[in-house]
Image (cartoon, rainbow, N blue to C red):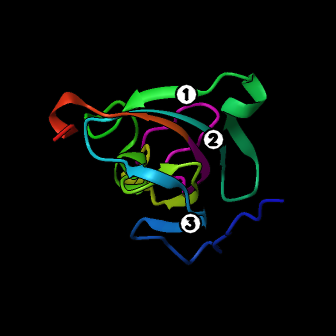
C-alpha cells in the first residue's frame, strides 16, 4: 500500500524529497541513459493522476535531456535496476504554474517509480 504525504495549505515544499523503498542492483542511472520504468503519480489529496502500471505499458525515456519533468531528471539519478523510489516533487520541479489536466497549477506531485531497465548511453560506457 502507498501512503501519500500531504501538506496543509500553509506548508510548501521547496526541495525534491527522495525515499528509496527498494534498493536495486547493478549499474547506476546516469544522465544520458535510456530508462524503462513503471510509475504511479498522485496529487496532494491522494488522487492518482497517472499510472503506467494501469495502462500496462512501461514508460521509456532518456534521463537528463528534458524529456521528463525536472523532478524526475534529478530524482531518478543513482537508481539501480529493480529499485523503487518515492519522489515528492515541488511545483517548480514539476509543472510549475501551468495546469496540465488533471494536474492543477502549482501542484506538489508524489510518484512511485520502479526502474525496470537501463540502456547505458555510449558516453557512459567507459
Task: Count residues near mark 3 (Cα–Cα under 10 Å), then give few for <14, some for 14-19, many for 20+.
Answer: some
Element on which disc 3 rests: strand
Q: Position of residue 65 (x, y in %)?
A: 25, 34
Instruction: Left or right? Give the position of 111 relative to 47.
Output: left
Looking at the rendered image, the quarter that the C terminus falls into is top left
Relative to the observer, which residue lies in front, 117 or 15? 117
Disc 3 + disc 2, Cβ < 8 Å: no
Q: Residue at x 55, y 68 (%)?
A: 19
Residue under label 1:
59
Instruction: Left or right? Give the position of 115 relative to 26.
Output: right
Whether 118 is drawn above or below 79: the answer is: above
Relative to the observer, which residue lies in front, 22 or 63? 22
Q: CA distance from mark 1 to mark 3?
A: 19 Å
Disc 1 + disc 2, Cβ < 8 Å: yes
Instruction: Left or right? Give the position of 10 relative to 46.
Output: left
Does the magenta run of residues contain 106?
Answer: yes
The range drawn in magenta is 96-115
Comes first in the chain, label 3 or label 2:
3
Element on which disc 1 rests: strand
Amino acid at each position: 500500500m502507498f501512503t501519500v504525504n500531504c501538506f496543509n495549505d500553509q506548508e510548501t515544499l521547496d526541495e525534491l524529497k527522495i525515499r528509496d523503498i527498494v534498493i536495486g542492483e547493478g549499474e547506476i542511472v546516469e544522465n544520458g541513459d535510456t530508462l524503462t520504468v513503471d510509475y504511479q503519480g498522485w496529487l496532494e489529496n491522494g488522487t492518482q493522476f497517472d499510472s503506467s502500471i494501469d495502462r500496462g505499458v512501461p514508460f521509456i525515456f532518456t534521463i537528463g535531456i528534458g524529456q521528463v519533468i525536472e523532478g524526475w531528471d534529478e530524482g531518478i539519478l543513482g537508481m539501480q535496476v529493480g529499485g523503487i523510489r518515492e519522489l515528492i516533487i515541488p511545483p517548480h520541479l514539476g509543472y510549475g504554474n501551468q495546469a496540465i489536466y488533471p494536474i492543477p497549477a502549482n501542484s506538489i506531485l508524489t510518484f512511485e517509480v520502479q526502474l525496470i531497465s537501463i540502456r547505458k548511453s555510449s558516453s557512459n560506457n567507459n
